[in-house]
Every structure is written in C-alpha cells, then in structure tokens.
Image: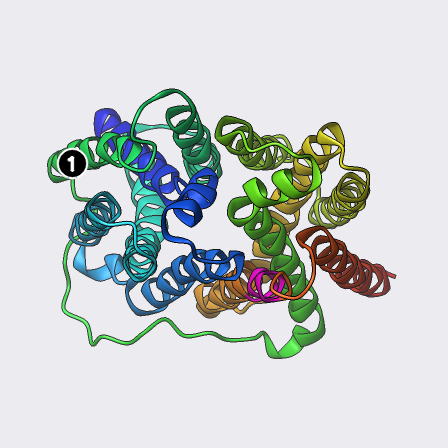
Amino acid sequence: MKSGFWMVAATFLTAMAFSTVPTPLWPLYQQADGFPTSMVTVAFSAYAVGVLISLFLAGHVSDWVGRRRVLLPGVLLEILAAALFLANHELPVLIIARVICGLGTGLITATATAHLGDLAARAGIRYSGHVATAANLGGLGLGPLVSGFLAQYVDGPLTTVYIVFLVLLAVCAIGVTLVPETVTATPRRYRPQRVSVPSAARREYFVTAAGAFTAFALFGLFTSLTPKLLAASVGTSSALLSGAVSCAVFLFGVLAQLSSGRLGLDRQLTIGVGALVGGVAVLLAGGVAGSLTLFVLAGALAGAGAGLLFKGAMASAARLADPAAKGEAAAGVFLAGYLGLTVPIMGLGAAARYVSLTTGLIAFCLVILVLLAGVGLQLRTLRA
C-alpha cells in the first residue's frame, strides 16, 4: 500500500507540474508565432475551462467507478496534451492542448486526493493531507522552474521539456495500473457534480467564495504573465528567472498551508487576506519602481496569502454546508476560484491591447485590493 501511495503522489506531482510548464515559455511562443499578449491569456484560460468541465462532469465519479478508472484516463489526457505541445506550437493547437491538459488535471486533482486518503488509511500513513498539498501546489511551482531551466540552458526550449514530461507521464500511467484499487465499483445513475449554497449562511459562503476568487486571480497572474511582467517592469527576459518567480509563489503557498495546522479558521482567513493585501501592494510598488526584489517579495507574500485564503475558504465551505452537501459546497468554491483564474487575467490581457502592461498591472492590483478590502471587512463584520 505504501508503494501505491507514493506512486499516486508522484503522479499527482508530475501532472500538476506539467500543467504549469508553459508559464516561462509564453514569450517564446509569441516570438515564434507572433500572437499578442491577449492571446496568451486566452490560451492560459483555456486550461481553467478544461479543469472546470472535468471537475463538474467527472471529478466525483471515482467514488463509485473506482479510483484507477478515473486517474488513468486523466494521465492519458495529459500525455495527449504533451504530444500536441510537442507536435505543433501554433496558437489554435496550444489552446486545444491547454483545454485537454485542464480536462486531465480536473480528473487527477479530485481523484488523486481521494486515492491518497484511501491508501494512507490502509497503510497507516498519517500525513496524506500534507502530501496531497505538497503534490498539488508544489507541482504547480515545480513546472515553471523545470521548463524555465531547460529553456535557458538546453537546446529546443519548446520541445525538450515536453519530451521530458511525456516520458514522466508515460511512466506514471504504467505505475497507476499497478496501484491497488480502493473503491469497489458499484452501479449508480450518473449525474454531474452539483453546486449548492448553504441556505442558512449565504452571506458568509459568498464572502469566502470571493476570497477564493481573489486567491486564484493572483495565482493566475503569476502563472500566465510573469515573463511579460518581468520584461515590462524589470527589463529581464530570463526564462529561468520567470520560472523561479512563479515557483516561489506556489512554494510559499505550500509552506503557508502546511504550517497553518494549528491556526483556527478565522485566523487562517484573516492572515491570508492580510498577506495577500501585502503581496498585491508590494507588487504594485514593484511594477511602478521596476524592482526585481519587490516583484519576488510580492510573489512570496501573495503566494502565502493565496494559499492560506483558499485553504480557509474550503474549510469554511465545509463548516457551513449541510453534512450531505459538503461536496456541492466545495464545488461552488472551486467554481469561484477558477473564475478568478480566468476572468481577471483575460481582462488584463485585453487591456494590454490598449495600454502598457505595467499600466494594466496597476489597474489589476487596484481591483484586487478593492475586492480584498471588501472580503476583509465582511469577515470582520461576520465575526463581530
């Protein structure tokens, strides 16, 4: 069971890392095909669309069809996406590959987390939640670091990294077939994942969902436009530096989540909002001043704040929901989060067609600060 647990963890980590591989490569794609920054945000957002479709249509079905029967198709979808990235880097193909990658990620995220919990219970492992967190956010941070390093120092920056991940994902697919199944397949009438809002606590639920929206908006910013923002604000085009900054965001998100076990829910949300406000304020200053130091510090603060805020939002949704509707309440928070991952970033991309990216970044930061101020004030009122 322990070997199966670590195989699933490795698969989860690899798949999440693959999903952020394009982060430092977007400027190279633009140079190769000549599409504008607004199309980068479209290609990036296509991934979130795929994740949402997958989560709501199939992310929950492993509870009755079996974990491996969902996890393996998820990995195979990632392999298909890697093959598309490897075969062609024209914009329509990139968008299709990103959607397919999102579809696979949606299947893997929900299923791997549940599978790790099942295997840990049977093997007597007590830290499955920490491993799932590290694989999830840690993988998201590892992807741009690996692709940035390979793009900087290895020939074929738009192909080498996909060959590497194609091999890793193929190994994971084989490994998944050998992992013990933990769910006995049972016939059940299919229905998509529902979303429900706790009727007795609608206001608090919507406030926490808004927190998830802002947290994912910052994750989206650093995983889509970091190379362009560094080039516009700091004047560097290093793929490795872009990957390292994106990695730092998720690294601090992981550390914040793993170190918050003894914090109460209210303190998690409060500290998360405060750190995110600090991160956005420093990002605003860094964009205006053109300071790399401030940009990196902003990523670390924003990552820690976003990690805590999303963790608190998920815990809050579970606390507010009826016992029979916890999954439906969590689905609503995920919906808010992935809307945050797409809508603000596409807005920033569209604005970049008419104003400088630095000006667009300033506007983005101001909007997020207003949203965070609203979330913070509402949380304070609710706790009064």
* 268 on left or right of 193: right
Label 1: which secondary element: helix
Name the quadrant of the N terminus: top left
Q: List x then y, in percent, for residue 14.
A: 32, 35
Placement of 189 over or under 370, stated as above or below = below
Neighbor class of circle 1 (other Cα within 10 Å; few <14, some 14-19, many 20+) is some
Q: Which stretch appears magenta?
A: 343-350
Q: Label 1 amino acid?
A: Ala
Residue 287 seen in render: yes
Placement of 284 over or under 359, stated as above or below = above
Name the quadrant of the C terminus: bottom right
Looking at the rendered structure, the number of numbered marks drawn on it comes to 1
Residue that label 1 marks: 170
Residue 60 seen in render: no
Q: Residue at x 53, y 66 (%)?
A: 339
* 341 on left or right of 100: right
Q: List x then y, in percent, for residue 275.
A: 75, 42
Q: Residue at x 40, y 62 (%)?
A: 46
Q: Residue at x 32, y 41 (%)?
A: 15
Q: Residue furthest top?
A: 153
Q: Residue furthest bottom?
A: 199
- Residue 281 is drawn in which quadrant? top right
Main SS category, magenta section: helix
The answer to whether residue 83 is magenta is no
